[in-house]
Image (spheres, rainbow, N blue to C red):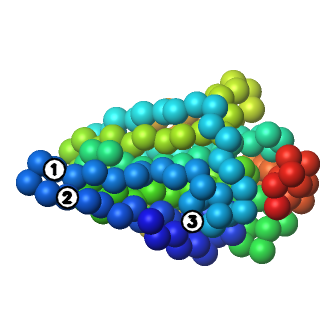
Amino acid sequence: MKIRPLTIDGAVEVTPVQHGDARGTFLEWYRFDTLAAAVGHRLELAQANLSVSARDVVRGIHFADVPPGQAKYVTCVAGAVLDVVVDVRVGSPTFGRWDSVRLDEDQRRAVYLAEGLGHGFCALTERATVAYLCSTPYRPGHEHGIDPLDAAVGIVWPTAAPQLSPKDAAAPSLAEAREAGLLPTFDACSAYLESTGRP
């Protein structure tokens, strides 16, 4: 398993070793010890989600209040997506920046993102199935989003006609979310990780 840091602190790309023969393929798509060694702490698991999307569907950019936030470990088990991480932590050196990784059923890569980071993806195939592990359960009223088409963030989505849910289409811009006090702060995220005994 190879782990490569993304340009956003707290986000990494994971490429598993695949073992194949005439019967098919086997791989370890998640190893708590390998990930923990790379990011400095264990990913606590509280919920697993599965999302099936049609081509050009864009989901996100979503994030949760910190504390406790919601760390995620994301992979695409069928089809392909462009997975996007956005730093929405006010005060972070990379605030407002984004990075992306293609997740698909061939390379079987995964993305880990820490609490306080925004997440979204765009389906690149007719059907794309994304599975993700979450550190905390969904908490209504504590989950937020920013406009995935916010020109100030400037995500380059691989579609000319992104399909958004009404909720995502109505999400505030990054600047509006900041002004409304919806965004986590870099200091709060760091303090939360320290309070859990995680670096």
Is residue 66 shown to the viewer in this render?
Answer: yes
The residue located at (78%, 74%) in the rendering is 93
Residue 199 picture location, percent across and down: 82, 61
At label 1, counting other C-alpha atoms closer than 10 Å, the crowd grade (few under 14, some 14-19, many 20 or more) is: few
* Residue that label 2 marks: 20
The image quadrant where one finds the N terminus is: bottom left
Left or right: residue 159 versus residue 72 is left
The residue located at (77%, 59%) in the rendering is 89
Callout 3 secondary element? strand
- CB-based contact (under 8 Å), mark 1 and mark 3: no
Work out whether mark 2 precedes mark 3 in sequence or the reverse, and give the earlier one: 3
Q: In the rendered image of this protein, does residue 2 appear above or below residue 147?
A: below
The residue located at (40%, 35%) in the rendering is 51
Quarter where residue 39 is shown:
bottom right
Q: Which mark is residue 24?
A: 1
- 171 or 78, nearer to the observer: 78
Tell us which disc is closer to us: 2 or 3.
2
- CB-based contact (under 8 Å), mark 2 and mark 3: no
Left or right: residue 67 versus residue 40 is right
